[in-house]
Amino acid sequence: MDPKLTEVSQLFERFKAAITRKDYDSCTELLSHLKVLLTSFRSLPPLFENTPNSIHELTLARDIYEHAVLLSVKIEDQDAFERDFFQLKPYYTDAGSRLPPSPNEYMILGLNLLRLLVQNRIAEFHTELELLSSTALENPCIKHAVELEQSFMEGAYNRVLSAKQNVPNETYGYFMDLLAKTVRDEIAGCSEKAYDYLSLKDARQMLLYTSDKELLQYIEEEHPEWETKNGSVFFQKAKESVPCKEIPSLQLINQTLSYARELERIV
Amino acid sequence: MTQDVEMKDHQTPSHSVSSAVPSTLQHLKEISSIIESGSYTKEIRRIARAVRLTMGLRRKLTANVLSAFLDFALVPGSDAHARLSPYLPKENEHDMEVDTATSAAQTPGKYLLPELEIYCYLLVLLFLIDQKKYDEAKACSSASIVRLKNLNRRTIDVLASRLYFYYSYSYELTGDLAQIRGNLLALHRIATLRHDELGQETLLNLLLRNYLHYNLYDQAEKLRSKAPRFEAHSNQQVYIVVGYLLAFTITILCMESLFCRYLLYLGKIRTIQLEYTDAKESLLQAARKAPVAARGFRIQCNKWAILVRLLLGEIPERTIFMQKGMEKALRPYFELTNAVRIGDLEMFRAVAEKFAGTFNADRTHNLIVRLRHNVIRTGLRNISISYSRISLADVAKKLGLDSANPVADAESIVAKAIRDDAIDATLDHANGWMVSKETGDIYSTNEPQIAFNSRIAFCLNMHNEAIRALRFPPNTHKEKESAEKRRERHQQEQELAKHIAEEDDDDF
């Protein structure tokens, strides 16, 4: 066996051991070391050279990057997640036909979709979605993310929150927590517009707090313009469009002048 | 002896063919002389004319004619000849002998024009594709691309752009588009460096097509936003040029058809990335610019345009679905529109299921999933208009929400709709009601004036755009368009239509 390959595999074993020990600092260190070593393999993207060991090397590299992605979720580093995911992606898309499918593929793709949702990058979410085959869309991990996006767009927030209970994989927990925060802000924004007032109890339930104290603290920090009195929250409404009292003369003059100019050009 | 008998047998049935053969060959020879003169005088229009004439001959090409022409155009025994002739199947050889004689009569040390060589590649490639010999076509087109990379002459550009197209087309037919992506990118770079605008446009379109074929919208958008585009000003410039030079029309028509296609790709990319307003604009423009004959292309534009308009919350007019020759193809989209218009989730689901096959084939399935949200919105709007006060439980029932807790769902959906200004209402949590607000007198506000202004602005803008895009018939002030010229122009338009229709025929 190729000595370089052996070295990488051994290092990878140590890395995996460190993950199970939850020793994340040494994990990150080992990972950067591994990534440097991977650059010396010529069969990996972007070169994709057909070396005798290529299948083995590709599989190993894919494993390493998959673990890197999962590690970034564990240490809650979204930027690292994005970087590692993009490094991993060619192994699924371009080398997918040459390698046996990875058991983690859909789980990681689903995670990525969830990340895009949390970061409110909906356009990219849909771009990624287009890349998936119809069989992939049936996968519970992917389906979970797709349904979340739908409920989110519709405004069925309680469905988003109940989805937290049945996550397909424990790694999803981190992003689901983040999503819950986003959802809370959304609900607050909607309630502000939709209700004149809410009782404290209802508001607490709606914003998913367990105690009134937390709720009051949230209101104080995020929405100081809300008013709490008599056990209810009153939302300050923006003034509705009032009937126009005066003629917006300056604007009208400008418009009429521009019409005149355009008409002159036509005639 | 046996051979002789065979020959005779052959000749009797193919009498009509053999009379056609010389004429086709004769045509080809004429075309080659056009190319020659175009090459010597450096006039691109002659080459363009040659390409146009060739397309007319396309159906008449046979192995015999081609090999005869190869012998005529390329010196037998030369590199180019040796490279091209193996692609042609050897059949009855009796015609050839005559022609070998003629070509032998030519000056032996004749300098081979690169234009002619490339033209021969194009002919052989056309023949192979028409004969459905796709593997040979792939080999032949790849060889031609290798050759093209080393040639840098403006007179070749027109031929080259056709070759690029068939290069990509032959790979698409065999489903290997991904293989040539790197090559196309390299060619695009070369074309850009050589200021070969036609090549650049062609290759950009091919690349976009290539990416979209694999749903790589991200890469397509990155390429599109970074690649040099000159459509905005070239559109104007080109038209000014037309005013002076009738000659370029065919090139421009090519450009036009390329631009049309580009708009479709652009529209698709923008739709996927949720930029619906821009997407609608480019899709509608593409549908409008496409010639009537390019039916498949127009259907595709219309399908996407309908979806985008639905996603924007608009309801396309009935006339769109009733366009001639499209009713059948647009039928699923018509029913879909109906479901969205009524705001009935149940009906929407039924339509989506009923035509799932069509939507999957059109690759619009994911867009239709997105539409669910719009259906709910429309339903909600209808409810809010018809009731001044309604319980949330009834809202959930009317919308047909199917979930564990429909009332809570309905409440948050209504809340979001209120925030997004889709409906004008308030919620009463304690009683579980949705209370619609009285619609005030809209005419007491500035609203109508603003709407009026935006319409005027749209009309004026439309007028200006139309002026800018106006194509002035050449020399109108000097002479009336002669019958012959008119015929030629019509032919060119047909050509353009075929151009676009060509690829789409396969899709539909």
Image (tube, coloured by chain):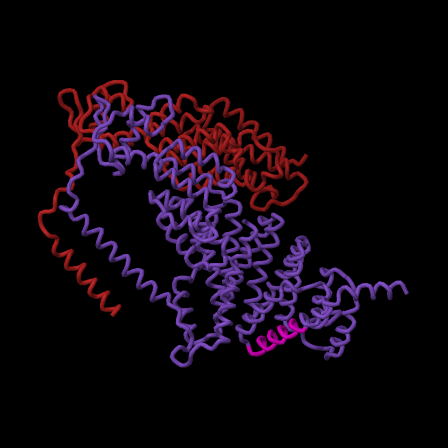
Chain colours: A red, B purple
Say left or right for B262 vs B275: right
Tell me if residue B297 comes above or below residue A81 in the rendering. below
Residue A187: quadrant of the picture: top left
Q: What stretch is highlighted in magenta?
A: B26-41
Q: Name the residue nearer the viewer: A241 or B207.
A: A241
Q: Can residue A41 be seen in this view?
A: yes
Q: Residue at x 59, y 52 (%)?
A: B180
Coordinates of residue B46 in the picture (x, y in percent): 55, 74
Q: Quadrant of the C terminus of chain A?
A: bottom left
Coordinates of residue A23 in the picture (x, y in percent): 47, 25
Q: Which residue is drawn at 21% across and 25% down?
A: B428
Tell me if residue A153 comes above or below residue B391 in the rendering. below
| Residue extending farthest left | A245
Q: In which quarter of the image is the N terminus of chain A?
A: top right
Q: Does the magenta stretch include residue B38?
A: yes
Residue A75: quadrant of the picture: top left
Coordinates of residue B33 in the picture (x, y in percent): 63, 76
Q: Name the residue nearer the viewer: A225 or A82.
A: A225
Say left or right for A144 vs A263: right
